[in-house]
Image (spheres, rainbow, N blue to C red):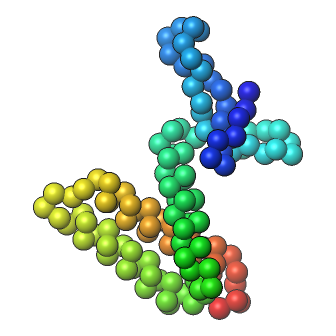
Amino acid sequence: MFSKVNGFFHKSVEGGRNHNENLLQQPVIFDNNSKTVLVEMDPRTYKILFSLFNELERADRKYKDDPMMEPKVAVKTIECERSELDRECQRSAPRPDAMRKEAVQVMTMGYKFVRDICDNPGEY
């Protein structure tokens, strides 16, 4: 049984020690045309990808008129995000939530680099 939650499909799987316990929801990427599961994810992977997609949507909305088009500028943007992550990691007491936020931003800029520059050769 599949259900769609937050843009991802979930497959109901049995969880726990006996059949009387509730079904767990396992995140999957589902091809609706062929009705097949393309990727099954553990909950941590799902959470990371969900964060990536949310940050990507936010960044695309904020910079809709300014996609990454120039490789040198895009690399500087990634370096800036990475340096923010580095600063957080160098604190005497790094905050996991802040490190996660910065790491997701680095990941998002890397994704945008591939999407906007590598997968669009000749457009910059």
Residue 77 occupies quadrant: bottom left
Q: In the visual, does 45 lie left or right of 115?
A: left
Q: Is residue 40 visible?
A: no
Q: Position of residue 16 (x, y in %)?
A: 50, 16
Indicate left or right for 77 with 34 as reference: left
Q: Which of 80 and 64 is in front in this view?
A: 64
Q: How many labels does the image show?
A: 0
Is residue 4 in view? yes
Is 75 located above or below residue 47 in the figure?
Answer: below
Residue 80 appears at what percent x and percent y? 37, 80
Residue at 51% in and 64% down? 55
The residue at the far left in this view is: 92
Q: Which quarter of the figure is the N terminus placed in?
A: top right
Residue 81, above or below 57 = below
Quadrant in the picture for the C terminus: bottom right
Up-down relation of residue 15 to residue 31 (above or below): above
Residue at the (44%, 62%) spot, across then down: 104
Location of residue 40 by image quarter: top right
User: Please, which residue is most extreme toward the front here?
Assistant: 62
Residue at (43% x, 68% y) in the render: 106
**Residue at the spot x=64%, y=73% of the render?**
115
**Left-right relation of 37 to 6:** right
Residue 117 position by quadrant = bottom right
The residue nearer to you, when weighing 77 against 6, is 6
